Image (cartoon, helix red, strand yellow):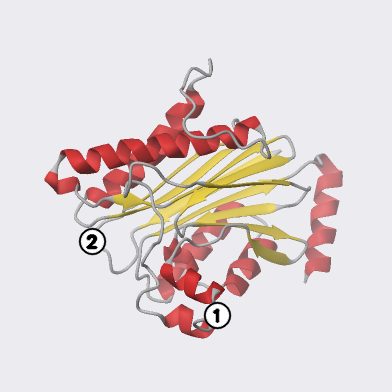
Amino acid sequence: MLRIAARTDQGRIRANNEDSFYVREDKGLLVVADGMGGHASGEVASRMAVDIIRDYFDDAAGEKAFVGDFDPGCLEGTNRLGAAIRLANMAIFEAAGSQAKYAGMGTTIAAVLIQNNRMGIAHVGDSRVYLSRAGDLAQLTDDHSLVAEQLKREMITPEAAREAENRNILTRALGIAPEVKVDLDEMTLADGDRIVLCSDGLSTMVSDEDILAVVRTAEDIDAACDELIGMANDRGGRDNITVVLAEIRKKKGLVASIWHVLTSWFRR
């Protein structure tokens, strides 16, 4: 059984919310987009991205054109997720060139598709996907940002990266060029796993340790989303904040209740 909760918040500084999200429990589809470009154009870009991905997977007959190369190392669903993102990139790039008010607009994207016990992951930019399992939190996506590249090359320390003024400079985003490289990955899910998708309005204000503390102990995932957004705002709320939290539960009834209590106790 898949349960999903989602929240978005303007934050304390920004004049509007340029984040967008989309979730669909019956399809196992979760998407977070963080727009950029100023004025209202970032909001337009992020909304275009999630709407195009939504429509792509709403096409029950599968008539949507496949965009880009098929990765034989990934399942069809994961490849379709990548194709939908490439289609969104083309549409945003075209829109950005059609009107002066949209010039330079773009968006990050982080998306997962959960089918049975497999999760496909596709992303561009610095919105993240995390997995909470057995008391640990793993970041499943790499940030496509200047600071992340500097960290990989050991040019700066993790401490310096958290305070860097250029931490919001992206090396990859949707809408900037007619084609974009989409990172694809897959993994097998287990009972009790919790998956977090978020914009950098959360990850830059709340540490991974604090995200884990909320996600692994929360009885209610809706309350966990609210708590994470509250923490980001309490610590400054410098950006828009979006959190999507999904939970995998395979056990049912009394067994599930006992299992949840036991695993929650031993994680502490």
Q: In this rendering, is residue 25 above or below 144? A: above
Displayed quadrant of residue 48: top left
- Give the x, y percent position of residue 221: 60, 53
Q: In which quarter of the image is the N terminus?
A: top right
- Label 2, on which residue? 15
Q: Quadrant of the C terminus?
A: bottom right
Looking at the image, which residue sits at the far left?
100
- Label 1, on which residue? 154
Q: Can residue 205 be seen in this view?
A: no
Amino acid at dot 1: Glu
User: Which of the two residues, 1 or 144, is positioned nearer the viewer here?
Assistant: 144
Q: In this rendering, is residue 61 above or below 53? A: above
Amino acid at dot 2: Ala
Q: In this rendering, is residue 101 above or below 148? A: above
Q: Can residue 46 be seen in this view?
A: yes
User: Which of the two residues, 144 or 259, is positioned nearer the viewer here?
Assistant: 144
Of marks 2 and 1, which one's residue comes earlier in the chain?
A: 2
- Give the x, y percent position of residue 202: 47, 65
Contact, CB < 8 Å: mark 2 with mark 1? Answer: no
Picture residue at 52% right of the left edge, 64% below the top: 227
Q: Which of marks 2 and 1 is in front?
A: 1
Looking at the image, which residue sits at the far top?
61
Picture residue at 23% right of the left edge, 49% below the top: 41
Displayed quadrant of residue 34: bottom left
How far apart are the alpha carbons under marks 2 and 1? Answer: 35 Å
Q: For numbered disc 2, what is the local secondary structure?
A: loop
In the image, taking residue 179 as reference, residue 135 lies left or right, namely right
Callout 2: few (<14), some (14-19), or many (20+) C-alpha neighbours within 10 Å? few
